[in-house]
Amino acid sequence: MLKNFNNEFFTLLIENFNKIITDFPLKKAIFKDLEEKYPGFAQECNDYCVRCIYDYITKPLNKNISLSISYTALKEALNVVDQYDKFYSYLLTILAEHNLLSIKNDILNFKWLTFDISTQKKLLYLKDKYRIFKGTIGLLEHCLEAYPKIFSGELPGISVLYPNGNTNFLDDKLSEDTAEYSEMPIIKKLTAKLIADYSQTNHLKILEIGGGRGLITRELLSVVNKINIEYHFTDISRRFILNMEKYVNDKHLNFVKCFKYDITKSSAEQNILLNHYDLVIGLDVVHVAPDIDFALKNLQQLLNQNGILCLLETTKTQYWQNLIMGVTTGWWQFKDQLRSHSPLLSTKNWKKALKKSGFNLINLMTLENKNSDATIIFSK
Ligand SMILES: C[S@@+](CC[C@H](N)C(=O)[O-])C[C@H]1O[C@@H](n2cnc3c(N)ncnc32)[C@H](O)[C@@H]1O
């Protein structure tokens, strides 16, 4: 018999998570962490990032004159526009973490380094050794090459990742990778399975926020019981909404509606139903909000009495991810106290943020390995 959404859902999701994870195919493989799966890659790719940052940041310095310069003078010498202040600081922080720079009272003191092989040769070595990450390494190279023009504002960073305003370049590049360094695809599959299982016997009114290219949408829509679902796909971008509309029309998924919803604006002032949804779901979306607390409170207004917020969030990053995603100014728009060098929140900070915004039951689930980088958050 079909049941309406009820309070059991939360408990069931948590209980079923453990069961599903036990039954999940390739369990052994998915429980390995990045280092076990691809030994050396993270370390070598991050080392390469440090080296490129060093090359870029120290370019204006003349070692015969001085290796000290003020934060502002270097920013001017590199032509960094204010929008990239946080990115510029992030690069300096990485150099400081690697003892290539010390910072005292706004004065930067660099260590002078010479490398045994050129940065270009190091790149060729990386590409050759880790062909399984060809796309990611190529994307990193593509972004780093554009840094002088991006930081000076000459080239909009967004056009570097999305040339001609579409996602084809990014999609093509990433599809060149034959390996996965993130656990998000696994977390995504697990979440879709949990919700799909529940939808077999229960009605669910689902709102997806920041649906973008539809990574979780397509997974979910292919496994849920279509008769029991009302699915609202939203994003801030018209292009993503139109793409998803076309997808659902082509697939005759008439229980799906696509419209605009902005997580950074008051829900009450937007064309959306309040206190309505059983489930609000978002994959790597809420961290884009400048103020997480405000965004979470907006989302809370959309949930009905038993409604659950389900966030799939990347909770750990490698340098190369920030160096790639950081080219867009949107990556650096965070303004709250929870974050300093990356828009992403750790699991600890997600807990803090949810508690502060009035969520009472909070469950964070990651795969059991010491370097888990993706988390499912269920909260109500
Ligand atoms: C990192 S992507 C998330 C990936 C997306 N869930 C997918 O499956 O492709 C972030 C998404 O959030 C959307 N976004 C950015 N700012 C937003 C806002 N203020 N409100 C709602 N969505 C937003 C972007 O358009 C993008 O689709």
Image (cartoon, rainbow, N blue to C red):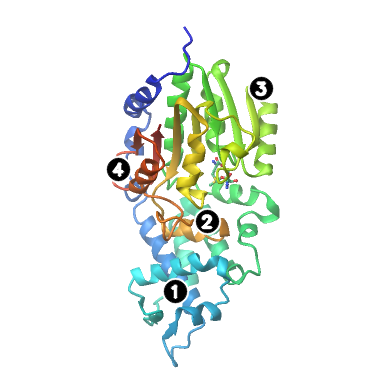
Residue tagged by mark 2? Answer: 331
Query: In the drawing, what numbered circle is on residue 254?
Result: 3
Q: In this view, does 161 lie above or below 108?
A: above
Residue 288 x, y percent position in the rendering: 52, 49
- Distance between the alpha carbons at the discs numbered 4 and 3: 40 Å
- 321 with respect to 230 (left or right): left
Query: In the drawing, what numbered circle is on residue 369?
Result: 4
Q: Is residue 287 above or below residue 282?
A: below
- 221 with respect to 98 (left or right): right
Amino acid at the residue labelled 2: Trp
Looking at the image, do the residues carrying marks 4 and 2 touch, with CB atoms under 8 Å apart? no
Residue 34 x, y percent position in the rendering: 36, 48
- Distance between the alpha carbons at the discs numbered 1 and 3: 53 Å
- Distance between the alpha carbons at the discs numbered 1 and 2: 21 Å
Q: Is residue 74 above or below residue 42?
A: below
Amino acid at the residue labelled 4: Asn
Q: Which mark is first along the chain, 2 or 1?
A: 1
Residue 35 x, y percent position in the rendering: 33, 51
